[in-house]
Amino acid sequence: MTAQADLVRKQALARLDKEAAVHRSNHQNVHARRYVVSNPALGGIEVVLIVKGSNLQLWCEARAIDGPAARALGGEGRPGSETYSEPGKYGRHSALKTMDRLHRGDAWRFVPKTVGELATILDAVKGAR
């Protein structure tokens, strides 16, 4: 993991540990941390941080951010229909399986490269944007 990627990971963990609740399914032992972020207009938004390779992935429910805004932030839409589109294959990261809504629901997947990108994405999830 590059120094920049490690900084983004550390900042993401610090911010979510401070501002969000741990999801009822808790964190995955190795690669993922599961949270519920409070959004005044929408209630709790499920968010998962996954460290995969040298990048941090941030997954959130699609209802948190509208399409044009999410795409402007570098989001990749991941429809719930992909979840079990191939027999015997989950179709998403296994850390999402224990989530209530992210398990099968529409989602955005972000790969923030800087702390600034991360902050903007998390602000949007929180409804502060």
Image (cartoon, rainbow, N blue to C red):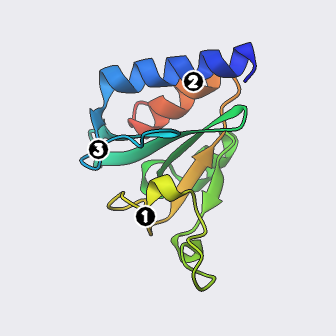
Q: Give the class, few, some or many, for how many residues have Cα within 10 Å of label 1's Cα (few <14, many ≥20).
A: many
Residue 93 appears at what percent x and percent y? 56, 56
The residue singled out by tag 1 in the image is: 103
In the image, farthest residue toward the right: 2
Amino acid marked by disc 2: Arg
Residue 83 appears at what percent x and percent y? 54, 72
Amino acid marked by disc 1: His
- Residue drawn 48% across and 41% down? 32
Q: Secondary structure at mark 3?
A: loop
Q: Secondary structure at mark 1?
A: loop
- Residue drawn 52% across and 52% down? 66
Label whose residue precedes the other's in the sequence (1 or 2): 2
Residue 125 quadrant: top left
Q: Is residue 74 above or below residue 116?
A: below
Q: Is residue 97 above or below residue 75?
A: below
Q: Give me the C-alpha separation between circle 1 and circle 3.
A: 13 Å
- Residue drawn 44% across and 69% down? 104
Q: Give me the C-alpha separation between circle 1 and circle 2.
A: 23 Å
Residue 111 appears at what percent x and percent y? 66, 38
Q: Give the class, few, some or many, for how many residues have Cα within 10 Å of label 3's Cα (few <14, many ≥20).
A: many
Q: Give me the C-alpha separation between circle 3 and circle 2.
A: 18 Å
Residue 100 quadrant: bottom left
The residue singled out by tag 3 in the image is: 23
Q: Give the class, few, some or many, for how many residues have Cα within 10 Å of label 2's Cα (few <14, many ≥20).
A: many
User: Marks 1 and 2: CB-CB under 8 Å?
Assistant: no
Q: Quadrant of the N terminus?
A: top right
The residue singled out by tag 2 in the image is: 9
- Residue drawn 43% across and 59% down? 102
Q: Secondary structure at mark 2?
A: helix
Residue 91 quadrant: bottom right
